[in-house]
Amino acid sequence: EYYSSIDKMQMLGEVELDLITATHMYLTQRQDQLYEMRSFVERVKLEHAAIRQELLRDAEYLEQPLQAFRLINRLVVDWPALHDSLAASQKQLREEYAKSVNETDAAQGLPNKDDLKGAVLGLQRLQSVYNLTASDMANNALFWNECFEIGIQLYQQAEYRSALEWLQLAAQLVDQIEDENAQGISAQVYEYLGMTYMELGEKQKAVETLKELLPSLSPDTPHPARFLLDEVEGTEPKCPKEPVAPHWYANYSRLCQGKRVPEPGSLSCYLDFERHPRFRLSPLKVEQAHLNPDIHIYYDVLTDAQIEAVLELAKQLESFRSTVVGDVVTETRVSQQVWLDYTSPIMSSIGQLLGAISGLETTNIEKMQVANYGIGGQYFPHYDYLSKLPDSYKESGNRITTNMFYLSDVLQGGYTVFPLLNVFLRPVKGSLVIWPNELRSLAPDYRVLHAGCPVLEGSKRIGNIWIHSTDQEFRRPCTLDPTE
Ligand SMILES: O=C(O)CCC(=O)C(=O)O
Ligand SMILES: [Fe+2]
């Protein structure tokens, strides 16, 4: 799978480069063949012309045995030899070409329809979260057929509102084409537009769209659009179900866009020299993003070199698609990840650093989950608290805090947001964010619903370490009041 990680997408760039190289080679060799063929035919043409001229002057030309022999020889030997050699070498070239395409596929695996679907849903997510129209998104950089493909994919996903926008854009672009094929093309786009209007319950618009198309089609040939029009005219419009957004969706989308309403009140930034002896000379740079529940950002905790070392370790492992509860792959979480343990020097020192910053015991921590997001990559609002604690965590308890390191900056988008707390965090490479997932009583804290917003541009990398609740009794004593 490619679309769920920018790292994987980068491999696809290489795949296309391989295809370009193989196709260039094929074309060069075909051109050499054509050149050979051309020189053969030119030579024979001259010869032939000479013969014809002679024939006009001297009808007995072909009675000359040598000339007769040469003509027969060409027809019996030279021409068939040319045809045979062409057939053989074309076959060989085609096979070589197919072989290199197959090798590329075997080495990397070409993307499939699911990648295309995932990429299109990623674009739609960006539109929805950041309030972008199809033409904002396309930004004059897409051809009609690309907009059409997006429209078809969205139609097939029953995302009719979004499909409509892209099909309208495709229709606008097709109308600008001055080409003989334009009619056939625009018929396809208008048919999809008509069907989309029907799905949206707008029968009148569907009929108008199809009628607009008919005059441009030849009246004699039966065209699918005519059947479609008949069908549409005889069908009752659908009553579409508009999806209901969760109550926090508007906050979520606004925070992803970097807007807090109302602006937060008294939060501060400070240098902390005291938390642990290691910060005495080089204090922690702390920013309060929210109090109760406390969300704190610690800046410059990892250097670029340390991050590189972590990513190098991550690169050595095969990354896999992130899942959600129950190990299910959904568009809720579009990223790929690996898990790093603390046996390497770099990971061991990160484990110790986390202990010093969090003030918690690090005996019960999960491996670091290193994730890379893909096209429109996101993690839809969720809780990190495990609603069903797997047996392997029975002793270590639930995830008392999330400790998320930003391992990259992000060019646009990709904020971490807390829709119920009116908090957004812009990823800053080298910083660490900590928030609790449990109240002091160890009951889940439902205020910390959070999300990784879709990445608009750039490659977002994070490293998550979840600290569990067992052994924290001296560090973060619990209460018996389930509301605290
Ligand atoms: O990517 C983010 O900003 C949030 C990630 C997250 O919530 C998670 O991995 O659990
Ligand atoms: Fe999370």
Image: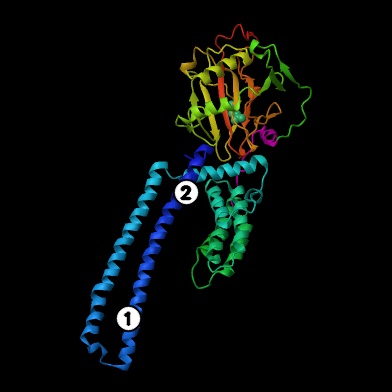
Label 2 crowd (10 A; few <14 / some 14-19 / many >=20): few
Quadrant hosting residue 76: bottom left
Residue 138, given in percent of the width and then of the height, sits at: 62, 51
Residue 8, given in percent of the width and then of the height, sits at 49, 38
Q: What residue type is labelled 1?
A: Glu
Does the closest atom of ligand 1 sit within 8 Å of the Cβ of label 2? no
Q: Does dot 1 land on a helix, a strand or a loop? A: helix
Q: Which residue is drawn at 63% across and 10% down?
A: 476
Query: Which secondary structure class fits the magenta region best?
Result: loop
> How far across and how far down the image is residue 197, in percent?
60, 54
Residue located at (49% from left, 23% from top): 340
Gap between marks 1 and 2 measured at Cα:
45 Å
Residue 312, horizontal then vertical, whole percent? 50, 29
Q: Tags 1 and 2 in contact by the CB under 8 Å rule?
A: no
Q: Would residue 21 appear left or right of 414 to someone viewing this image?
A: left
Judge by depth and name the residue closer to the eye, 37 or 460. 37
Q: In this view, does 366 lie to the left or right of 74?
A: right
Secondary structure, mark 2, is helix
Q: What span is in magenta?
A: 236-257
Q: Work out which residue is located at the far front of the displayed protein and give it.
A: 66
Residue type marked 2: Leu
Q: Mark 2 — residue?
A: 17
Find ligand 1 in the image and state its quadrant: top right
| Up/down of 95 relative to 270, above or below | below
| Residue 242 included in the magenta stretch of the image | yes
